Amino acid sequence: MEAITNKPFRKICKQYGADILITEFIASDALSRDIKDSIIKMDFEEMERPLGIQIFGNNAESLIKATQIAEKENPDFIDINWGCPVKKIAGKGCGSGIMNNIPKMIELTKAVVDASNIPVTVKTRLGYCEESKPIVEIAERLQDVGIQALSIHGRTRSQMYKGEADWTLISEVKNNQRMSIPIFGNGDIDSAEKAIEYKNKYGVDGILIGRATIGNPFIFLQTKELLEGKSPTIIPIAEKVKVCKYHLDQLIELRGEKNAILEMRKTYSGYFKGLSNFKPHRIKLVSSTDYKEIQNTFEDILELYSNN
Ligand SMILES: Cc1cc2nc3c(=O)[nH]c(=O)nc-3n(C[C@H](O)[C@H](O)[C@H](O)COP(=O)(O)O)c2cc1C
């Protein structure tokens, strides 16, 4: 996820049990033009494997070039994003914007597969809009041009993030006799319990968890525990504070203090969800621009909520 699954956060997710990691999406145009921010987004550590570098684009030339550049980083796979619904991306025919031109989607995917020496996977949606959800056919055609796994977010491009994700079509793809590649389901998984329930109900090979991981990498540990028949660990507040501090410090190393402090703001509600009378602390965390003040707030939280 853009501006979320940077290296520090991916490493934390890995430590808590995420099986497969994928970078933020990276514009193939920017990669081919050697833009520094895009190059940095490809960086990962050995402990993160298996890891995919995710690219997006709307033309074969830049997608092929980006594939070759990304491959030099030696990831385990290249993931193509045909799922992003955001106007500035989809409006240019990137991400799920391509879903109103399926032949082009297949042609560009084939170009990437042909250019790549490592597995290529795809992340996409059900279709372009309510009237057009051809994901079963798309999945077959993507498999036919050589992708090695498919992740499906159970919404259309037009839906953006509205309504509820529909997993029935994801399940139809998985149950299609023609399909042999792994199918991963995605959309609205917000607890370990729901992850297991959906995996069993819809029979997918794996589950992608997005928004519910923000400030909550612990969801991976809890899901694994449930999968093994154990009760999910309730994470003590001291551990949450420790992880949150580590997240901030690692992000400062990557992005510099000013940027990291701003970027961390979207994570605090997740880390400290459910704490009573937390509002004054949250306001401090999301308004402070001073590292020391943030550290002091962490100390206050520890002192006040350690028994939680
Ligand atoms: C802030 C934000 C950034 C995202 N960036 C990406 C991205 O870079 N690549 C991608 O495949 N999906 C991205 N997504 C979509 C998520 O991966 C996921 O498909 C979507 O949020 C639905 O899953 P969820 O309900 O578990 O969050 C992003 C979502 C959000 C909210």
Image (cartoon, rainbow, N blue to C red):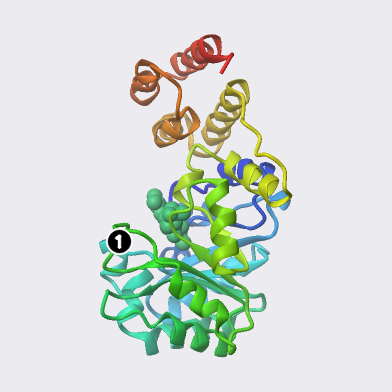
Which of these two is toward me, 55 or 96? Answer: 96
Q: Is residue 4 above or below residue 155?
A: above
Tell me: 142 left or right of 236: left
Question: Please, what secondary structure does the residue beneath circle 1 have?
Answer: loop
| Above or below, comparing residue 6 to residue 255 in the picture | below
Nearest the eye: 142 or 296: 142
- The crowd level at tag 1 (other Cα within 10 Å; few <14, some 14-19, many 20+) is some
Image location of residue 8, percent across then percent down:
58, 41
Q: Residue at x 47, y 27 (%)?
A: 272
* Residue at horizontal 55 percent and vertical 85 percent from the top: 176
Q: Amino acid at mark 1?
A: Met
Give ligand 1's quarter of the image: bottom left
Q: What is the quadrant of the C terminus in the image?
A: top right
The residue drawn where x is 57% and y is 47% is: 192
Report x, y in % for residue 256.
48, 33
Give the percent coordinates (x, y) of residue 261. 43, 29
Depth order, front residue of 132/199: 199
User: Percent from the top left, x then y, of residue 279?
Assistant: 35, 20
Total residue callouts: 1
**Image position of 237 (left or right of 100):** right
- Identify the residue position indicated by label 1 in the image: 160
